[in-house]
Amino acid sequence: MVDIAKSPAKVSGLVLHAAARYDFLVWLKTWGRERAFREQMLSFARLRMGESVLDVGCGTGALTIEAKRQVGPLGMVCGIDASPEMIARAERKARRAGTDVTFMEGAAQAMPFPDAHFDVVVSTLVLHHLPRKGRQQCAAEMRRVVKPHGRVLVIDFASGGSHGQRLLAHFHRHGGSKLGDIIALLSDAGLTIVESGVAGRSDMQFALAAAPAGA
């Protein structure tokens, strides 16, 4: 059971609403191999059976559904997104797949969950949509909702490079993020960096961090 805050938070940054178009572009840019793409991204989170997972900025839910497959029937997975259109499409996907996951509308800067609620928190291709303050708030919230010894995974587009070669170039007009900035962001939030580097392709990068033993 997921405890939900009653009042929605104000959202800052870019919110994507074109859910069907988003899915089409993902399919196009991954040459129809979206599941393999999602599996590769989640591999950095080191998910284990029975864990609880939060997908921040879940979009249309493909990564969330894949996370549930990896943590199994005893695991609990939730996805949040600021766009009601994305959430509606994600819920339809989950129903078609017969997957027991929870989706809800929510802001990355003020997540509707209690402290220390999830074993793992993942944020993929979200940070570049947020302004600096929003990124700091998101990092602080990920730190707040992850359990002691839990893990936080952030994957984002690298800054610079050829805009036309990037996955979902249409959707990340705000550019990317420097890996050093992501590492600093998570460190400043009180997390310890475990691993970082290229996330399978040169235009994406990841940072995996661990939460301390106590609050």
Image (cartoon, grey):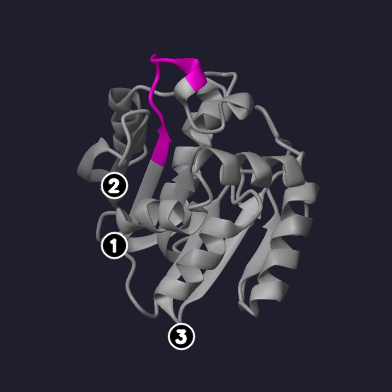
Residue 33 location in percent, x, y?
A: 48, 53
- x%, y% of residue 107? 65, 44
* Residue 44 visible within the image: yes
Alpha carbon separation for disc pair 2 and 1: 10 Å
Which type of secondary structure does the marked residue at label 3 adopt? loop
Residue 46 is labelled as 1
Q: Amino acid at mark 1?
A: Arg
Residue at which label 3 appears: 74
Callouts 2 and 1 close, C-beta under 8 Å: yes
Chain-order first, disc 3 or disc 1: 1
- Is 200 displayed left or right of 169 in the figure? left
Query: Who is closer to the viewer here, 151 or 114?
Result: 151
Which residue bears the numbered disc 2?
A: 208
Secondary structure beneath label 1: loop
The C terminus appears in which quarter of the rendering? bottom left
Residue located 49% across and 44% down the image: 30
Disc 2 and disc 3: Cα gap in Å? Answer: 24 Å
Q: Is residue 113 among what the camera can see?
A: no
Where are the magenta residues, as a range?
155-164
**Residue type at numbered disc 3:** Leu
Q: Position of residue 132 (x, y in %)?
A: 51, 21
Give the quarter of the figure containing the N terminus.
bottom right
Q: Which one is earlier in the sequence, the residue at label 2 or at label 3?
A: 3
Measured Cα–Cα span from mark 3 to mark 1:
16 Å
As drawn, is 24 to the left or to the right of 63?
right
What residue is shown at x 31% (from left), y 29% (from top)? 202
Type of amino acid at the residue the image marks with label 2: Leu
